[in-house]
Amino acid sequence: MARGIGLFLLVLATTLTLGPGLGQTKDLVLRVLLKEVPLGQEVRLLLPTGEVRVRGTGEGVWAEGRVQPAWDLPGPYFALDGRSYRGGVRLFSQGGKLWVVNLVLLEDYLLGVLPAEMPEGFPLEALKAQAVVARTFAVNRLNPKAPYDLCATELCQVYLGLAAETARHKEAVAATWGQVLSYSGQAISALYHADSGGMTAGSEEVFQKPLPYLRPRPDPYARGPKSEWRLVLAPEAAAKALKALGRTPKGQEPPEVLERSPSGRVWRLRVMGVEVQGPEAQRLVRLMGLPSALVEFKGWQAEGRGAGHGVGLSQWGAKGMVEAGFGYREVLGHYFPGTFLSDLLLGKAQGAWAGWP
């Protein structure tokens, strides 16, 4: 990771008062999509003041006997479908659906993300690295023109809300408060996965766009439950995966790797008489139910390494690095070369934080 004082990102913050979390009075407010339901379907929210029932209509949102274009219900917390969340909630109808969006401070949002994305038993320095990456991922997804910034599922980052919080995850978030990874003055696309299988992937291998800080790198410390695996692939699973990509099987041949990416992952693959290449080949591997595209085939038997797309931070690799004596800054420097560790200035002037010792 580049040494010297990090580039500083200034975010104009929105004020929102919350209960006892990590967010301060002035902090960045995220809009996290929790649920979308068809118009007319009732949604029940439990607020500190009691239960509120709402439903979307063609004219807006019905609640408390009135219809408005949108409703903002204040926090400091609420419950939806038996799960509690910090912050407030915004309700609006759009595209034939009622949208339920959590308005939550960035630091408090992370308290509900970390428990879902990294086990509590991982070393604290690994949890701190995950906190920085998750924070950066969220900041990178800010989009004032969109109806929300993030979703609460694995399509974005898994967000489990207030009930999932733990003291250990909270410690990791507090210890890295406001820290993000930046490149050329912008928050980076901070991707991560479970286990690289010993070699991370370049961003273009999976997401088409090459990024200078997401390059293939040896990852010798990655040692997890799926660092090595063997699976028998069913022809029916391969046929279903091909159809999901809009391809029609033309035979019964088992998978054959015709070309590999710079990180050793499948880049060109032929299966059941159909050939696919590039990111589509890696998507096909995942659709077939295999943990990673770092795989070899012996007939219908797959032998591979790692779990996930392989781009960016390897969570099991981070754990291994910390256990070998590295700190979270060194972990981040390994997986995101050329980036800066910067302060996200949340609604107030702060002194320079010299990112590296």
Image (cartoon, rainbow, N blue to C red):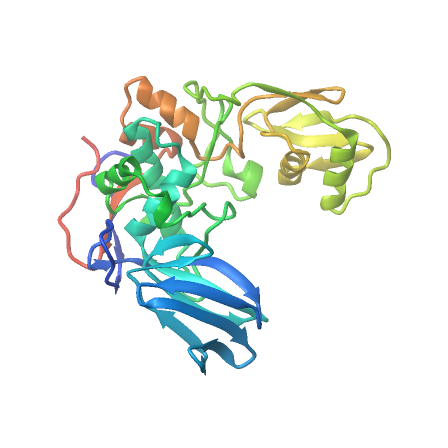
Identified at 75% across, 47% down, the residue is 246
Drawn side of residue 342 relative to residue 299, left or right: left
Q: Quadrant of residue 66?
A: bottom left
Tell which residue pokes out farthest to the right in this image: 251
Where residue 168 appears, as percent x and y from the top left, is: 28, 35
Between 334 and 325, the one nearer to me in the picture: 325
Tell which residue pokes out farthest to the left in this image: 351
The answer to whether residue 186 is seen in the rendering is: yes
Is residue 158 shown above or below 224?
below
Is residue 86 shown above or below 335?
below
Identified at 39% across, 46% down, the residue is 137
Between 123 and 264, the one nearer to me in the picture: 123
Is residue 162 shown above or below 55?
above
Drawn side of residue 37 relative to residue 234, left or right: left
Between 212 and 271, the one nearer to me in the picture: 271
Q: How many marks?
A: 0
Where residue 272 appears, as percent x and y from the top left, is: 81, 32
